[in-house]
Image (cartoon, rainbow, N blue to C red):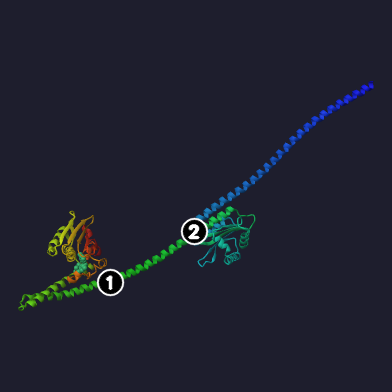
């Protein structure tokens, strides 16, 4: 019994131990699974952290690279600005390349630099280079001259670089210029491509970026503009020099021609003066003898002879007047004429002219009008000479104005001069005749002139008299409507004599 109880108790104990153990085991496995979960979570977090660390490193690297690119670009832009300023402040082509020679080496930082430009004969010339051997340069130039495909592509405005060029073009450029990395850009003007700019590096460590491509493209463009400005300036400069030479030659020719004209004019004046003097003496005798004959002291004169003698007298008078006019013209022209300047009342003079010519005007029923400014001052002039001007102008107006016409004299005053206008409602003067009107002996071909005698000396003499007073005389006219002769006279004494005192 005791044994059985003992066995029973042992079983119960064992059962209890097993249950306790089982319970302990269940609890432990729970803990293990919790721990495993935690461990997995830790692993995931660790992986995440690892990923983030990698990302940070990557981003840092990219940032560094971007910073480097940015620094390079800033450096490039500074160089670009400096070179642009250097080449745009000169208008001499050789000086532009001289400055580029220095700047490309020191500022751009490429191993090889080259600028090729067409010369006037359209041949490619090396204008600036660095880092190339002479053989390399010869090879490049001769190849470009042989194969124009690259130049044609550049001519369309494209810039090529080792970063963006298609493989075939890249291979060609790399081989031609003996580099690994490069940028080549056209030098363009308004008339198209005039050359190209190349930069490159041989070492793989010095690669080229898109920023470099942009920079070289801008610089090549700037070189094109500077060269165009220099060439335009040279053109302008050359043509202005040619123009100056032409002007100098022409001026010399004109001066020689003027001298000739002055000589001829002097000879003419002297000739007229001499001939007039020579003519005046015998004419005076002819007039004298005719007068003696007419008195009848040398015998009775038949009426027919008397009429002829009177004609001799009249013609002699006309000839004397002509000779006197000629002498006056030549005297005034040569500055030998003595003007008797004095005070003069212009308005009174105009009244006198009216009185003098009233009979002729009455004959043709011509109306005489005046419009004279009341404030015309006392003038300083040679009255007898200015009277001759009036008589000639008004006399002509009467001569060339048909019956019932009008003649008007107008006198206006401004600060320094009086302007007198003698107007008529006569036949007028054609433009082409106006141009010759003041030439000595010029008379317009018209019916009046065919019937009325004249010398063609009145107007040249009038003009010379007015000019001797430092005034001007000119004419405006409308054919069949009438003619206006205008002349000015200075109001101040010093202005009247200024010209003469300058000449003497
Ligand atoms: P003349 O009267 O002796 O011919 P002038 O020198 O005084 O010489 O004039 C030259 C010419 O100018 C005249 O012959 C005439 O044809 C023209 N002329 C001058 N004044 C007038 C005028 N008022 N109207 C039209 N023609 C004129």
Q: Residues within 10 Å of mark 2 (few under 14, many from 20)?
A: many
Which residue occupies 33% across, 69% down? 254
Lower position in the chain sequence, tag 1 or tag 2 = 2
Residue 387, position as x, y percentages in the image? 16, 63
Q: Is residue 303 left or right of residue 154?
A: left
Location of residue 22 by image quarter: top right
Which residue occupies 20% across, 74% down? 274
* Callout 1–callout 2 Cβ contact below 8 Å: no
Q: Is residue 221 left or right of residue 277?
A: right
Residue 110, position as x, y percentages in the image? 59, 56
Marks 1/2: CA–CA distance = 54 Å
Q: Is residue 264 left or right of residue 59?
A: left
Residue 47, position as x, y percentages in the image? 71, 40
Location of residue 173 by image quarter: bottom right
Find ligand 1 in the image and state its quadrant: bottom left
Q: Is mark 2 within 8 Å of ligand 1?
A: no
The reply to whether residue 54 is in sight is yes
Q: Quadrant of the C terminus?
A: bottom left
Q: Residues within 10 Å of mark 1 (few under 14, many from 20)?
A: few
Residue found farthest to the bottom: 299
Location of residue 165 by image quarter: bottom right
Residue beneath label 1, please? 263
Q: Is residue 58 left or right of residue 492?
A: right
Q: Quadrant of the N terminus?
A: top right
Residue beneath label 2, please? 226
The answer to which of 46 and 114 lies nearer the viewer is 46
Which residue occupies 56% across, 52% down? 76
In the image, which is nearer the foreground, mark 1 or mark 2? 2
Disc 2 element: helix
The answer to which of 409 and 90 lies nearer the viewer is 409
């Amino acid at each position: 019994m005791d044994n059985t109880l003992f066995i029973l108790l042992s079983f119960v104990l064992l059962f209890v131990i097993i249950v306790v153990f089982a319970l302990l085991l269940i609890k432990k496995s729970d803990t293990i699974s919790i721990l495993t979960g935690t461990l997995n979570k830790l692993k995931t977090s660790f992986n995440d952290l690892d990923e983030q660390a990698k990302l940070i490193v990557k981003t840092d690297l990219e940032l560094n690279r971007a910073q480097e690119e940015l620094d390079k670009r800033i450096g490039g832009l500074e160089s670009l600005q400096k070179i642009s300023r250097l080449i745009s402040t000169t208008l001499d082509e050789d000086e532009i390349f001289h400055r580029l020679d220095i700047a490309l080496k020191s500022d751009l930082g490429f191993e090889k630099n080259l600028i090729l430009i067409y010369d006037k004969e359209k041949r490619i010339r090396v204008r600036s280079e660095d880092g190339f051997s002479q053989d390399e340069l010869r090879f490049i130039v001769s190849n470009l001259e042989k194969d124009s495909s690259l130049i044609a592509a550049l001519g369309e405005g494209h810039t090529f670089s080792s970063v963006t060029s298609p493989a075939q073009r890249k291979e060609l450029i790399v081989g031609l210029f003996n580099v690994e990395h490069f940028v080549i850009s056209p030098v363009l003007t308004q008339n198209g491509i005039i050359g190209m700019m190349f930069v490159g590096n041989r070492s793989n460590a010095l690669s080229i970026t898109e920023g470099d491509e942009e920079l070289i493209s801008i610089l090549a463009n700037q070189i094109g503009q500077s060269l165009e400005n220099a060439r335009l300036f040279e053109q302008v400069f050359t043509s202005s020099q040619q123009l100056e030479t032409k002007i100098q030659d022409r001026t010399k020719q004109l001066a020689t021609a003027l001298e000739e004209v002055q000589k001829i004019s002097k000879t003419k004046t002297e000739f007229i003066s001499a001939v007039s003097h020579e003519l005046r003496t015998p004419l005076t005798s002819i007039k004298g003898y005719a007068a003696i004959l007419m008195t009848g002291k040398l015998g009775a004169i038949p009426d027919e002879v008397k009429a002829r003698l009177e004609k001799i007298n009249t013609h002699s008078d006309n000839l004397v007047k002509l000779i006197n006019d000629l002498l006056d013209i030549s005297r005034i022209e040569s500055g030998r004429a003595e003007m008797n300047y004095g005070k003069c009342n212009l308005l009174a003079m105009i009244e006198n002219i009216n009185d003098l010519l009233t009979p002729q005007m009455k004959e043709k029923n011509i109306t005489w009008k005046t419009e004279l400014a009341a404030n015309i001052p006392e003038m300083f002039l040679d009255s007898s000479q200015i009277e001759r001007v009036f008589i000639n102008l008004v006399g002509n107006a009467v001569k060339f104005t048909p019956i019932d016409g009008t003649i008007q004299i107008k006198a206006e005053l401004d600060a320094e001069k009086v302007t007198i206008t003698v107007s008529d409602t006569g036949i007028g003067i054609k433009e082409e005749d106006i141009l010759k009107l003041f030439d000595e002996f010029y008379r317009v071909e018209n019916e009046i002139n065919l019937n009325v005698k004249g010398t063609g000396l009145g107007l040249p003499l009038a003009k010379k008299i007015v000019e001797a007073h430092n005034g001007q005389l000119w004419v405006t006219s409308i054919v069949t409507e009438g003619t206006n002769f205008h002349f000015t006279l200075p109001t101040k004494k010093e202005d009247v004599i200024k010209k003469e005192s300058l000449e003497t």
